[in-house]
Image: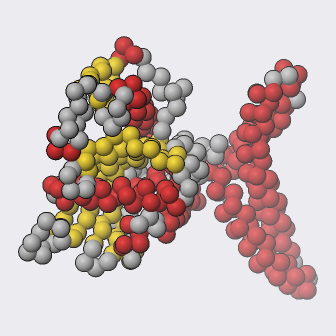
Amino acid sequence: MRKELAEQFGRLEKRYEELGGKMAEPGVLANHVELARLGRERTRLEDAVTLFHRVQELEAQIGDAEELARSADAELAELARSELEGLRAQLEQAEAAMLKHLIPADPNEGKNAILEIRAGTGGDEAALFAGDLFRMYMRYAERRGWKTELLSSSPIGIGGFKQVVASVEGPEVWRHLRYESGVHRVQRVPVTESSGRIHTSTATVAVLPEAEEVEVQIDPKDLKIDTYRASTAGGQCVQKVETAVRITHIPTGIIASCEDERSQYQNKMKALRVLRAHILEMRQAEQRAERDKVRRTQVGTAERSEKIRTYNYPQDRITDHRLGRNFHNLPTILDGELDSIMEALDQAHTARTMEQVASGTHVPEARE
C-alpha cells in the first residue's frame, strides 16, 4: 500500500475511534440529534476501516508466505508459493474496494435539480431542438417516476422554446442528470427547409442542484424586483396586469424571471427557486476552481461551453463526445430512454477517478 494511502486511511481510522469515544460521552448520549449524526458518520467510516485492516492483514500474510517460499524445505516452499497467488488476488480485490472510499462524495448527492434549456445557434430550428431536449428529459423523468414542474418558459409559435426551465424532484435525480450540462448539437433537415439540406443547430443545457433556503439565504435588500406584463409566444394575448416577475441579485448580477403563472406571487416564488439554484451553483463553482486548479476530469466537469453530445438524425446516431461512443436508435432515446447513456457516463466518471486515486495523482477527502 502506498504511504499516502496508508496515511489517509490511518486518519480515517483515528476519526472512527474518536467518534466511538464521543458517542459514549454523557452529553452526547443525552442529545439524540447529535448522537444520530455521529452514528451516521461512524457507520460511513466503518467499511473503510474494516477494509484497511483487511489489506494490512493480507499484506502481512503475503510477507510471511514470500519468506516461506524461499525456505530450504521444498515442500513447504511449494505450498507457500501456491498460497501466494490466492493471497495476491484477495489483496488486489480488497485494495480496489478500499480505494472506492476515497472517491469524493458529491456535495449535491440527494438533491433535486433545476433543468434549464436554452436555444443556441440556429434560429427557430435551435428553439425546436430545445423543445425536443425538454420533452426527452420530461419523458426520462416520467419513466423514473420523478416529479417535474415547469418554472419558466419562452415558447415560440411552432412548438419549440427560446428558453425553458423546470424543476425535477425524486430519488437520485442529481446523480443521473448531473452530466447533462453543456452544449448539445443537432444535425438534421429542419421542417422549414424545402431544399432538404442538413442544418446544424445547438441548445445549451444546464443542470443545477436545487438549493434549500437554509443553504442559500438571500437578503431582500440585495434583490431588485421588476414586474411586467406577461405574454404568450409572439407577443399575443398580452395580459393587462403585471404578473410577470424578473429578479436581479445585485451582488452577483444573476437574473431569474418567471411569467408562466397568473399570480405575481407564484411567479416570484418560482423565480426565487431558480435564483437560489444559480447562486449555489456559482458558489460551488468557485470552490471547485479553488480546490481543483490542477486536476480536471473530462467527464463531469459540467462546463456549459463544452460540446458534449451530437444528435445526428440522418445516421440515426447520438455521439457523446466525452465518452467517444455512439448510441443508436435516436427516436427511442429522444423518447426518454437515456439509461444506457447515463450509466456509461457514471461508470466513466467513477473509473477515471479510481484511476487517479490508484495512481496517486488524486487523493481526495474521504466519502461523507
Whole-percent x, y for residue 228 in the image: 23, 26
Residue found 29% across the figure and 29% down from its top: 244
Residue found 76% across the figure and 70% down from its top: 90
Pick whichever, 51 or 328, lies toward us: 328
Pick whichever, 263 or 310, lies toward us: 263
Quarter of the C terminus within the rendering: top right
Name the quadrant containing residue 138. Answer: bottom left
Residue found 39% across the figure and 77% down from its top: 329
Up-down relation of residue 31 to residue 77 (above or below): above
The image's colour scheme reads secondary structure
Whole-percent x, y for residue 39 in the image: 78, 37
Relative to 295, 317 lies left or right: left
Residue 16 visible to the viewer? yes
Residue 126 visible to the viewer? no
Relative to 206, 230 lies left or right: left
Count of numbered badges drawn on the protein: 0
Name the quadrant containing residue 221. Answer: top left
